[in-house]
Structure formats: C-alpha cells, structure tokens
Image: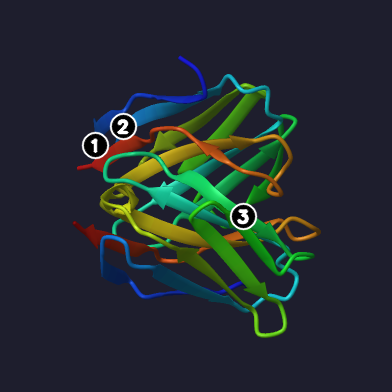
Amino acid sequence: ETGVTQTPRHLVMGMTNKKSLKCEQHLGHNAMYWYKQSAKKPLELMFVYNFKEQTENNSVPSRFSPECPNSSHLFLHLHTLQPEDSALYLCASSQEQLYNEQFFGPGTRLTVL
Amino acid sequence: GENVEQHPSTLSVQEGDSAVIKCTYSDSASNYFPWYKQELGKRPQLIIDIRSNVGEKKDQRIAVTLNKTAKHFSLHITETQPEDSAVYFCAAIDSGGYQKVTFGTGTKLQVIP
C-alpha cells in the first residue's frame, strides 16, 4: 500500500491495558505527526518528529508515549488511558516539517472502556 | 497561543453556487495556511494552501485569500458540485521557532443537487 498506513484501524481497550498504534509512510518524508480527532473539536497536534527526533510535544499526558525508530515508522504507545481519550488518532507525514502538505493516514478509531 | 476561529460551522448551497468559508487567527507568527477536506469516514486531504508572502492563490474552482493585516483567510469554492460535500478544516501554522499547528473546528459543507 502506498502513502501513509496505520494499524490497527479499530481498537477497543480497557483502562488498564497497554496497546500500541503503528504508522508507516512510504513517501520518503522526513517529518511525521500524531493528531487526535475528537467529535466537534479541532484536530489536535500531539507530537512532531523530524528526522526521527521529537521536536514537539503539545502538553500531551504521559499515558501517551511516542516512538520513532526511523523516518518511515511512528508508534504511539498507550497505557492506562481514560474514556475521554476515545477518539480517532491520525498519523501524518510531510517532506519538510510543518511547512508543506501533510499526508494523513486513515486513522485508528480508539475506544477506551 | 494561537487561536483559529472558523465560520460557518455548517453551510448548505445549491449545486452551481459558490461557497465561502472564513478563518481568523491570532498569532502573527503563523506563516502557512492550508485547507483540508475530509469526506465522511475518510482521511483529511489538502485541497489548497497559501503562504504568508502571498495574498491569493487559485486552483481551478478553489481559491484562497489571505489578509495578514486583519489575520484572516478564506476558502472560496465556485460552481459547487455534490462531490464537494465534506468537512473543510483550515489551519494556521507557525513553521518557525515555535512550530505550532492550530486547526479550525471545521465547516460541514452540503451541496444540494
């Protein structure tokens, strides 16, 4: 598959579970992002990675832990989440950090019980 | 921090009419203003963007205008078609020192055939 892929597409977890979201981009980009999309709220930028280095953490709770092993892969590790963390989590990538078109993945629909 | 207001939240137009969506921002450091279209159940996709050194940009039926003094930018869609129906998001991005991305709350556009 080309572009930006995300797995899983749907995830249901309890508050005590630990899970990980995966994102992979096949576009040769050097910047990757995690966003949270909740109903009736703006897209919220969570983390930014540029050349594998984290450059932004927008006051995200520590129960969300990102990992970027290389420029093509991005993970979001989840632990002890709250029901209000239920949302669509979107990964995106771009050629140059923030100043060019971002290509979004299909998202992971997360439900926290 | 940056604050982006987007209006209207919903917009219905007859097919063939024009649609205008407006956004205002607060941070004069914002220098990149993309517009994304998100169809139901799909990922956001860039439709047009404008940088702070340009006042207007057009791509076929879509145009964006930017007024830096007033800190507002607008999306114009002419000759609307049913396939234009979607949620449209504006964003104000500071790609410089503070690396901030702020999205508007979205406009749900319905084009009535």
Tell me how the rendering is colored: rainbow
In which quadrant of the rendered view does residue A17 lie? top left
In which quadrant of the rendered view does residue A80 lie? top left
User: Dot 2: few (<14), some (14–19), or many (≥20) neighbours within 10 Å?
Assistant: few
Q: Where is residue A64 in the image (x, y as percent from the top left)?
A: 48, 42
> On the rendered structure, is B46 left or right of B95?
left
Q: Mark 1 points at which residue?
A: A14
Callout 2: chain = A
Q: Can residue A62 be seen in this view?
A: no
User: Dot 3: few (<14), some (14–19), or many (≥20) neighbours within 10 Å?
Assistant: many
Amino acid at dot 2: Asn
The structure residue drawn at horizontal position 48% and vertical position 66%, both measured from the top left corner, is B76
Identify the residue at the far bottom of this view.
Answer: B70
- Badge 3 vs badge 1, beta-carbon distance below 8 Å: no
Q: Are marks 2 and 3 on the same chain?
A: no
- Does residue B106 lie above or below A35 as drawn? below
The structure residue drawn at horizontal position 42% and vertical position 28%, both measured from the top left corner, is A21
Amino acid at dot 1: Gly
Q: Give the numbered dot on residue B49.
A: 3
Callout 1: chain = A
> On the rendered structure, is A24 left or right of B54?
left
Amino acid at dot 3: Asp
Q: Mark 2 points at which residue?
A: A17
The structure residue drawn at horizontal position 52% and vertical position 41%, both measured from the top left corner, is A34
Identify the residue at the far top of this view.
Answer: A1
Q: Where is residue B27 in the image (x, y as percent from the top left)?
A: 68, 75
Quarter of the picture containing the C terminus of chain B is: bottom left
Could you say which is closer to the camera, residue A61 or residue A73? A73
- Badge 2 vs badge 1, beta-carbon distance below 8 Å: yes
C-alpha separation, residue under disc 3 versus residue under disc 1: 40 Å
